[in-house]
Amino acid sequence: MSAEQEKQLLPHRNAIDEIDAAVLELLNRRAVHARAIGELKGTGVVYRPEREAQVLRRIKELNQGPLSDEGVARLFREVMSECLAVERPLTVAYLGPEGTFTQQAAVKHFGHAANTVGCASVDECMRQAEADQADYAVVPLENSTEGSVGRTLDLLVSSPLKACGEVVLRIHHQLLRKREDWEGADTVYAHAQALAQCHDWLNKHLPPHIRRVAVSSNAEAARMAAEDGGSLAIAGAAAAERYGLVALARNIEDEPDNTTRFLVLGKQSTVPSGQDKTSLLFSTPNRAGSAAELLAPFSEAGISMSKFESRPSKTGLWEYVFFIDIEGHRDDERVRAVLERFAERNVFVKIIGSYPVAVL
């Protein structure tokens, strides 16, 4: 770089240094207020999903660029995470091991200041939160390509935990290996859903002699590939970094909009944020028209529904429970009126939770 270019850069660098100093001062002032709020709350709940959702929406509305809305949301998510840690660091259980998409979802929602704890199963993840070993649990609920995660739905039937947030994560799969070529590869490991989500790509590009083996998670696949030089793995960028793997091919998912939705589960109820969703569980007798009777009150009240799915109840042959997501909060007048109608008809309803719609 020439002396003239250095001279032209100097005022910009000086300005950035001044701005950085001002930003640092403001961040610490914010942390002081966060600590004061924590002291006023005492030993109660420190994490308020509705408040954080409102902050992130407001920041995106205020943003005039050149930073993207998603970029400023990520920055402020980390600022809030660090300020929350000044009050009290949170412990968040997730479906592990380290490097899974569920961990990515937990970090996206709570920031890097939260203490994330990997669990071997969704069952263990939820037990951690139920037993107060973790403040919250983050569990996968549904994928845009492969549908719902049945085990999560089954556990929600009996779990005392409440949904207090959701995370929507774009899923990008990478083909990973310890070395930078295909030579000698004989196996590709991945979670069964990842193998399904990359089915067409694998059929087109993977040599026919390479076996496809389903394992408990993509992060586990990455760990196995890191230990075995003859193996490949399908996993995300976080797993590649964690286990020191090289991406032989990137974004190999068949659907470019492949997205997974996760629920944040805890023991608190969330007050309305202004843009909310409610997850419900219904059980009705197995007779003609029972599903239609569930749907009609929502339609009549003009309440939009984004999910409707049945699962075997496991309490009787051909008996089912219905999982429904609707627009609005349980305390909203229209939603409350519909729920009262169900109570009058003695329909079993479990409110899994009302929570802010994910801030993308």
Image (cartoon, rainbow, N blue to C red):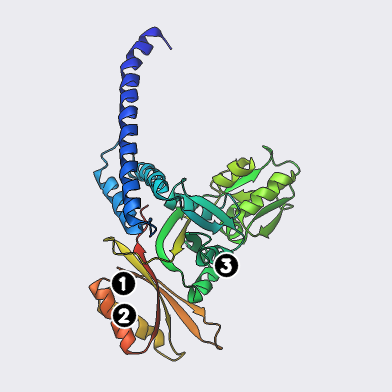
Pick the front one: 71 or 81:
81
Pick the front one: 75 or 168:
75
Q: Who's the residue at 25% across and 39% down the image?
A: 64
To which residue does mark 2 refer?
339
Pick the front one: 170 or 314:
314
Residue 334 lies, in percent from the top left, at 24, 75
Question: 334 left or right of 45?
Answer: left
Tell me the element at label 3: helix
| Residue 178: assigned label | none
What whole-number distance in Å separates the C-alpha atoms at marks 3 and 1?
A: 27 Å
Q: Who's the residue at 35% across and 60% down the image?
A: 357
Residue 187 lies, in percent from the top left, at 72, 52
**What crowding class fits label 1: few (fewer than 14 Cα within 10 Å), some (14-19), or many (20 or more)?**
many
Residue 347 lies, in percent from the top left, at 38, 87
Sequence-first tag of 3 and 1: 3
| Amino acid type of the residue that numbered disc 1 sits on in the rendered structure | Arg
Q: Who's the residue at 32% across and 58% down the image?
A: 50
- Whether residue 206 can be seen here: no
Tell me the element at label 2: helix
What whole-number distance in Å separates the C-alpha atoms at marks 1 and 2?
A: 8 Å
Is residue 31 depicted above or below 93 in this figure? Answer: above
**What crowding class fits label 3: few (fewer than 14 Cα within 10 Å), some (14-19), or many (20 or more)?**
some
Question: 184 left or right of 68?
Answer: right
| Amino acid type of the residue that numbered disc 2 sits on in the rendered structure | Leu
| Amino acid type of the residue that numbered disc 3 sits on in the rendered structure | Asp
Label 1 close to label 2 by CB (< 8 Å):
yes
Label 2 close to label 3 by CB (< 8 Å):
no
To which residue does mark 3 refer?
123
Residue 26 lies, in percent from the top left, at 30, 36
Image quarter (top left, top right, bottom left or bottom right) of the N terminus? top left
Sequence-first tag of 1 and 2: 1
| Residue 330: assigned label | 1
